[in-house]
């Protein structure tokens, strides 16, 4: 089960990296990093509610 989650996470990461490579880009600001952190933490807490 953990291996399946790791595979899914790896596939998602690879898809996001490929998307980023092909994207025109975005200005990276402190607000950008805060939004990114919030998004990642929110997704992690939804996927693994018992891991906290």
Image (tube, rainbow, N blue to C red):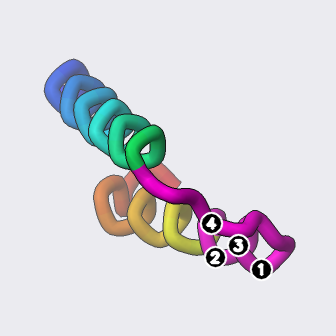
Of marks 4 and 2, the one in the foreground: 4
- Circles 1 and 2 in contact, beta carbons < 8 Å: yes
Query: Residue most toward the front?
Result: 24
First in sequence, mark 4 or 3: give its number.
Answer: 4
| Residue to which mark 3 is pinned | 32
Gap in Å between the C-alphas at discs 4 and 2? 13 Å
Question: Along the polypeptide, which appears first: circle 4 or circle 2?
Answer: 4
Quarter where residue 38 is shown: bottom right
Q: What element carries label 1?
A: helix
Could you tell me if the residues under marks 3 and 1 are in contact, i.e. CB atoms within 8 Å? yes
The residue indicated by pointer 4 is: 26
Q: What stretch is highlighted in magenta?
A: 23-37
Q: Are marks 2 and 3 in contact (CB under 8 Å)?
A: yes
- Label 4 vs 1, first from the N-terminus: 4
What residue would you read off at disc 2? Answer: 35
Name which quarter of the figure residue 18 lies in: top left
Residue corresponding to mark 1: 31
Q: Residue 10, percent across and down?
A: 32, 28
Disc 4 versus disc 3: nearer the observer:
4
From the viewer's side, name the closer residue of 18 and 49. Answer: 18
Residue 1's place in the image compared with 16, above or below, is above
Figure disc tally? 4
Q: What element carries label 3?
A: helix
Q: Which residue is drawn at 30% across and 58% down?
A: 47
Asked whether 8 or 26 is in front, the reply is 26
User: For the residues marked 1 and 2, what is the alpha-carbon distance in whole angstroms?
Assistant: 6 Å
The crowding category of the residue bearing disc 1, from other C-alpha atoms within 10 Å (few below 14, some 14 to 19, many at least 20), is few
Q: Distance between the residues labelled 4 and 1?
A: 12 Å
- Residue 37 percent coordinates (x, y): 65, 64
């Amino acid at each position: 089960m953990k291996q399946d989650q790791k595979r899914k996470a790896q596939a998602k990461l690879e898809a996001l990296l490929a998307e980023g490579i092909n994207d025109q880009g975005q200005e990276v600001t402190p607000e950008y990093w805060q939004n990114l952190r919030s998004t990642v933490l929110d997704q992690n807490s939804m996927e693994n509610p018992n891991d906290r």
